[in-house]
Image (tube, grey):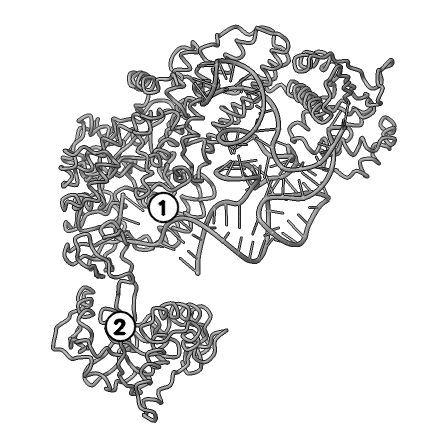
Amino acid sequence: MGIDWSGIEAKWRKKWDEVKDFEANPNEKEKKFITVAYPYPNSPQHIGHGRTYTLADVHARYYRMKGYNVLFPMGFHYTGTPILGMAKRVEAGDSEIIDGLKNIYHVPENDIKTFVEPIKIADYFHEEIKSGMIEMGYSIDWRREFTTIDPVYQKFIEWQITTLKEKNLIIQGSHPVGWCPKDQNPVSQHDTMGDVEPDFTEYILIKFKFDDYIIPTATLRPETLFGVTNLWVNPGTKYKKVTVDGEKWIVSAECARKLEFLERKVTYDGEISGAELVGKLVEVPHRKEKILILEASFVESHTGTGLVMSVPAHAPFDYQALVDFKKNQPLGSELQLIRPISIIQTEGYGEIPAKEAVEKLGISDQNDPKLEQATEEIYGKEFYGGILKQNTEQFAGKKVSEAKESIKEWLAKEKYSDVLLELTNSPVKCRCGAECVVKILTNQWFLNYGDNNWKEKANRCLDKMSILPQEIRGEFNYVIGWLHERACARQHGMGTKLPWDQAWIVESLSDSVIYMAYYILAKFVNSGKLSADGLSKEFFDYVFLGKGSSDGIKLPKDIVEEIRKEFSYFYPVDSRHSGRDLVPNHLTFFVLNHVAIFPEKDWPRQIVVNGSVLMDGKKMSKSMGNIIPLRQAIRDHGADPIRLAIIISAELLQDADFNLESVNGIKNKLVALLDECSKLKAEKLGNLQAEDKWILSKLQSMISGVSSSIEKMRLREALHGNLFSFEADLNWFLKRARAKGRNDYSGILHEITTKRIAMLSPFAPHIAEEMWEKLGNSGLVSQSGWPTVSAKIDAKAVLSEDLLKSVMDDVANIIKITKITPKKIIIYTADSFKSKAYHAILDKVMSGETNMGAIMKDLIANPETADIKKNPDFVQKTIKDILSEPVEIRKTKLETVEFDEKGLISDELISLAKADYGVDVQIYSESDSGIYDPKGKARHSRPFKPAILIE
RNA sequence: GCGGGAGUUGCCAAGCCUGGUCAAAGGCGCAGGGCUUAGGACCCUGUCUCUUAGGGGUUCGUGGGUUCAAAUCCCACCUCCCGCACCA
């Protein structure tokens, strides 16, 4: 409809630019430092990103109006592998990604061509995202913008990582990763075809002696060593004779290769075919028994070592292979004598669980795919519910789940076993086409998040922090609890090199944890006052930690002092916003790194976590094609309607559903409000009538309600209170004023609307300015103060209107049920002795007594109210009346001794009834002489609940 | 498995911490009316059920319990969603 959203938005953005209100420098006011997790520029931002930033912006704008000096800055996170992967794919001409860039993100072809360079991708989306943020009206101090590959930022990261190392929080060790042998790089989800995360697990190799050689077999169930009856070999496989770290092994070729990547020293000595091994004897470790190597077709060379130990009692594959094998042996052969050895007792199973599972599923041979299912079932049941039997010697009687670790340790100690890491979801293919393996990276650098002192400090910080919403707090403690060493460096990509080991680059989740401090520097960097030259450890130590002095630093002293001052002013971070997906990583690391580096006074104060955004109730995803780029949405609907639609749809932690209907609803609402604003004129308020006092009281409560909601970041509630709930009160006010035929209330409406628009301003900043202007108010609404609760709430006015409303409701109700057309309405107010009784009952209820009998006894004991015993129904109903009211109202009623119901109704209700039904109203007090009461209704009257007769 | 979150009246979604204002906000949808040449938008009314007097009945995943009083507190169970690492 007739609103030029983008015109209005541009107009006010220009005004904001002129007043430079978002550029925060230290001053005498109290500060708020509000930050959001900076974006990773590998795609345009969509509605979902918009949510977090919008919440933070509302937060910032609110505090600015409250009179705080608010710093709300933004940077861009260039470091990370996804952009690298994208560049590689663009270079390779991967049509999937190029089509996506073209059709979903609408990147011009000329730009796509440059995307073979990762930095071009980052630069492109950086500008795209920034434009969207500006168009959304975010009140960001752009003088402090930076990217994480800026030279000064890199110096900052070097200082951070060095400081951690000096505190012994960075350690070196080896670590397994998914690895592409061709690229010579670790691979993660976005480096693989089909975006699969390489998943690996640790197998135990049980070493069987075979002459001079060792035949290792891989297992996840080392406890089954006690139940081994034979080995399985695939006669068609060529096995390698190899020397592994000085021991002679026989394994498949694939296994030998895997061992190489696991940093084992492997030399190749020769080959031996599987067929040659069939029928040979090997010695079982510890048991020292000789068992046979038998042939089986299910044995695969690429799994484990290519040889399998057979535990037919507990492994369905082995059981079935044994059955198959025996079929081909002559009756009476001693091979027929091989019997499963049962070593685990599990409830619901007999001696040979594997046999039961195989038979239950109707498995016919060892190549039956249902064997996987059987294996899973038995494994799970035995692991969690199985008890080891007597023949497991020192482990007998233990639960499998508990004994497993000690068995592993024992095997390793006795040198009966070794370890093999293997992909569990192989084959995993790198985007380059090569098949991935598990590699042990030696000399990997770790942040030692396992350090208990560190954890303790982080928990201490967390305890003092405000975490919004509260529900998420436990998750932080939990994450800190299970965190252990975490790799903090990688070998490729953009970023900062480790100062002491140039082969490594600081990993991107580690170079983004204390950068809020960098916003202070960024201003000086961007204005040319600071460059990477000569930035020493002493400089950072001084400006961020206050260590030493500015004397020894080779930079102009006044600049250094100014930076130190500005840092001291703005730090710590007052609020950090982010999506909930960052809780187990970034947000927790943010706390950990702050407590490690900064003194306690500079530890962060608050974390605000929000849920994600759904599109028409569904998750946004590329494959569904329902990703809405933010800038597109702004063009289609306007920035403010989007901001409001996102906020109004759900509270903080819930997923917000974004849909067209709600955006349209919001739009219409705003249009109507804008229209309203241009009609209202500021007028001096005259004598206040009952409804005026009431609506002003309601306004006061609304202001305090909205303010406290925002403090708790319950923005949905705040917006709703202002925009929707209050509307009901306003309607009542208008109804009352119109019924009286007044034309002097424009001034009140103007005042009310002015306050409402001010409170709308953080949420819908552009249109609020437009409304403010239409109202004829001077200046910018964003620079006006946040409305304060100025007058006392007029309790009597509230009681009065409540009474009028409830009488009108009752009248409407009666008419609805009886379907009569009213000709006359007669109202009877309660007698004064009922008021006394009412007060006595109220007093009782407020002191916690709700028992009818006890209250009755009390009333009868008092001569003033003793008469009530004739009307027990009154007491019963009055108790119910009182209990169905908010405690606040009860209190005011208790305090208001004199309340002239009859007067109020005669003064105020007649016009209402006339307006609604066009009839006259007669009012009597129950005890009036000459009362007209043909139906005996009057005696049913109660205080605040007059009786009604409609004719 | 470990940890977290959630199940509310046609749908979405508040309320639960701090029990009584709760037959339960608001939005959407639906029905009726107004406005309009018509549609859209907007405004009003209704939207668990019974009821010709402002009242009653049955509801907040299921089953118990605490209480004068439970959507709200406690216990058990069922169902759904999310995270679990080197990846932003």
Q: Residues within 10 Å of mark 1 (few under 14, many from 20)?
A: many
Mark 1 or 2, closer to the camera: 2
Q: Chain of mark 2?
A: A
Q: List the residue tagged with mark 1.
A: A588
Which sits in the foreground, A636 or A874?
A: A636
Q: Position of residue A110 (x, y in %)?
A: 14, 33
In the rendered image, the vertical position of residue A413 relative to residue A832, given as above or below: below
User: Disc 2 marks which amino acid?
Assistant: Asp
Label ID, residue A151: none
Q: Position of residue A609 (x, y in %)?
A: 40, 39
Residue shown at 23% from the left, 61% from the top: A438
Q: Which numbered tag is attached to residue A418?
A: 2
Q: Residue at x 20, y 79 (%)?
A: A274
Task: From the viewer's perspective, tell me whether residue A518 is left or right of residue B30.
Answer: left
Kind of residue at disc 1: Thr
The N terminus of chain A - image quarter? top left
The reply to whether residue A166 is in sight is no
